[in-house]
Amino acid sequence: VSLDAAFGRYDARSTGRISGGDLLNLLQDLGVHPSEERLREAWRAVEDGGSVSFKKFERWWTGRGVTYVVKRSCDDGSEEDAVCYRGDRTSADVGGLTPNKRYTFSLRVVTANSFSVFSAPVAVLTSPSPPPAPALVSVNDKSVLLKLSPGKGGTATYTVTRRLMKCLSGKKETVSVRKAKEAGWVQVFRGSDSLVNAVGLLPNCIYQFRATCQNLEGVSSPPSDVTNGATLESKFSVRAANAPEVFTVECTGDVVTGDLVLFTERVYVKDGKAVAAPKDGLGGGKRGSGGTPRVTPRSGGGASLTSVDSRGGFGSSSRSGLFGGERTVAGL
C-alpha cells in the first residue's frame, strides 16, 4: 500500500494534514490494527498542533524507533498475565510483585508498522520479605536462644547475625571484647530451623541480633529490625545444678524503662526479725543479697529479669532462720 495514497484518502484538500480522528483508519488501511495503547503511542509520536502532518507521520512510519513490551506471568496461575512495561528503554524496574514467588517474563518488540512474537520466557524467583526481629526466648552467660519467624510469603532458610555492642562489667575492655566489637556483624546461624541457639558469646555483654530470609535459590531478603539482648554474668548462668535458684524472664517489647515490676521473695525469721534468703540459699546473707531480682534494661525497650531464689518450704529451717512465707516487692 502506498503511504502517499493512503494518507491522501483522508487529506481531501491536500494540506498535508489529517485530523486525529482519521489516524486509526489510516493505520488500518496500512495493515496495522492497533490496540488502544499502541494507538495512543502512535498519536504521541505523530501529533502536530492537534492534527497529523504527513511529514511527521512518514518519519515515524519509516523510522527505526522501537517499543519494548514486557509481559508478566505467574507460575502458579494465582495472578493474571499483565503487561508490566512498555517503552523505549532497554531496562526497566518492575514493581508490585509478591515476595518469594516465581514469575516469568516475556519480551515483544513493536515498531510503527510491525511487531514480533513474544520471546521465550525467563523465570525469576523474587526474594522473601524481611522477617520480624528475632524474639528472645532465654539468655545465658555465653548463649542466647532466639525464635525466628518468616515474613510475608514465607522462606526456605534463615540467616542470623550478631554484633557486640557493649560490655556491662564497667572494667577496662579485654582483648576478646575489643576483637568482638571490631568484627562487626558475625553470622551465627544459617538453616531452616526457627529456634536458634546463638553460642560463643561473652558474659555480661549487650549484643544485637538480626535475621534475613532466603528463597530456594539463595536470594536473601533485607535484614530484620535488630533485637537487643544482654548475656548474664557467669555467676548468674543457668545450669542444671542451680536451675531452681536462678531464672531469667525475657521481656521484649512489654517492659520499658520506668515500669514498676513486682517480684515475690521468700522471707525467713531470725532472732525475731524478718530477713531475705541468702545468696547461697543456706544462711548468713545480708538483707537483699538473696531473693533480690536483677533487672537488665534493653536498649529500644524491654528488659531481662533475673532472680536468685532459695529453696525450702514453709517452716523449714536454715542458717537464715525459720522460713516464714513470701512477700511481694517492687522494683524499677
Image: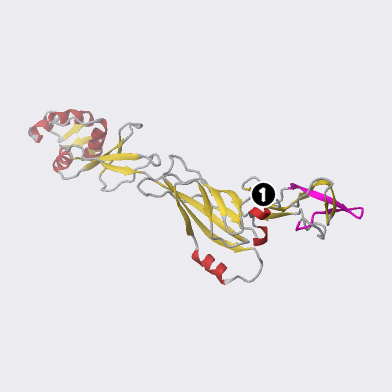
Q: What stretch is highlighted in magenta?
A: 260-280
Whether residue 122 sits left or right of residue 307 in the image: it is left
Residue, disc 1: 256
Q: Where is residue 310 in the image (x, y as percent from the top left)?
A: 76, 52
- Secondary structure at badge 1 equals loop
Q: Where is residue 226 in the image (x, y as percent from the top left)?
A: 54, 52
Q: In this view, does 204 lie above or below 72?
A: below
- Taking the magenta stretch, the answer to whether it contains residue 149 is no
Res 111 → quadrant: top left
- The N terminus is located in which quarter? top left
- Taking the magenta stretch, the answer to whether it contains residue 261 is yes
Residue lying at the far right in this picture: please name it. 272
Whether residue 97 sits left or right of residue 41 in the image: it is right
**Colour theme:** secondary structure
Whether residue 162 sits left or right of residue 105 in the image: it is right
Inspect this view and state whether residue 224 appears. yes
Q: Residue at x 43, y 47 (%)?
A: 157
Inspect this view and state whether residue 297 appears. no
Q: Is the magenta stretch mostly helix, strand or loop?
A: strand
- Which three-letter amino acid code belongs to the residue tagged 1? Val
Relative depth, front residue between 50 and 253: 253
Q: Where is residue 95 in the image (x, y as percent from the top left)?
A: 37, 42
Q: Position of residue 257 (x, y in %)?
A: 68, 51
- Crowding around mark 1 (Cα neighbors within 10 Å: few <14, some 14 to 19, many 20+) is some
Relative depth, front residue between 286 and 20: 286
